[in-house]
Amino acid sequence: MRRIRPALFAIPVVLMLTGCIGEPEPAATPLTPVQACDALEKAVIAYYDTTSPGSTIEEISPDALPDFAGFDIPPPSCAFRMRPDPAVVPGDVFTIESFYLDYDEAMTQTVSESLEAAGFRRTDPKFTTWASSGQGRSYSAAMLVFAPGDGEAYSEAAEHFRILDLSLGQN
């Protein structure tokens, strides 16, 4: 009988063990709602840096949202107010982006009904946009839905969350 050479036996054992040494790559931890809102704030800033240079963005506490032309804004997961550069657009002009993470599907209907009850009229039946005016002001509302993997900046920022974005503008 032939003896097995120790070196030939040791090489496969060493190769097998090297796969067991070290920690495996940990799975990515999903974002919390707070982290998703932080990421959405950065995405909102990036969006308005492009579409409205010189604008300011501020976070608004969900319980500190302003009255909006008689429409009671449902408390969002997070909200941000954008004010354009006053040298470009003077006056009390702003847009509020209210984000609802993993929202209840019924919300798309209840928000629509609430806007219309407050006097907003749908601008086009094909789109979820509304308009209103009063006291020398114009108001607009748009409801956008973002889903994981749709390639949109807000979806990418919030990763695994479905997002309803209620965008409200005062001119």
Image (cartoon, rainbow, N blue to C red):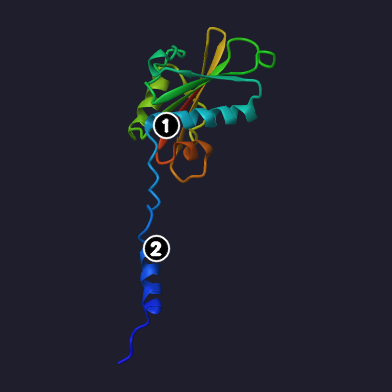
Q: Amino acid at mark 2?
A: Thr
Residue 84 relative to residue 70: left or right: right
Q: Position of residue 53 (x, y in %)?
A: 66, 24
Residue extending furthest toward the right: 87
Q: Mark 1 or mark 2, which is nearer to you?
A: 2
| Quadrant including the C terminus | top right
Is residue 72 or residue 125 the one in the foreground? 72
Q: Position of residue 4 (x, y in %)?
A: 34, 84
Badge 2 is on which residue? 18
Q: Residue at x 69, y 13 (%)?
A: 87
Q: Residue at x 48, y 37 (%)?
A: 157
**Residue 108 seen:** no
Depicted 134 relative to depicted 154: above or below: above
Measure the C-alpha gap from mark 1 to mark 2: 36 Å
**Residue 141 seen:** yes
SS for dot 1: helix
Is residue 20 or residue 159 the one in the foreground? 20
Of labels 1 and 2, earlier in sequence is: 2
Q: Position of residue 170 (x, y in %)?
A: 54, 16
SS for dot 2: helix
Q: Residue at x 43, y 15 (%)?
A: 65
Q: Position of residue 54 (x, y in %)?
A: 65, 20
Badge 1 is on which residue? 35
Q: Count residues near mark 1 (Cα–Cα under 10 Å), then give few for <14, some for 14-19, many for 20+.
A: few
Q: Amino acid at mark 1?
A: Gln
Q: Count residues near mark 2 (Cα–Cα under 10 Å), then give few for <14, some for 14-19, many for 20+.
A: few
Residue 42 relative to residue 90: left or right: left
Q: How many marks?
A: 2
Q: Residue at x 36, y 65 (%)?
A: 17
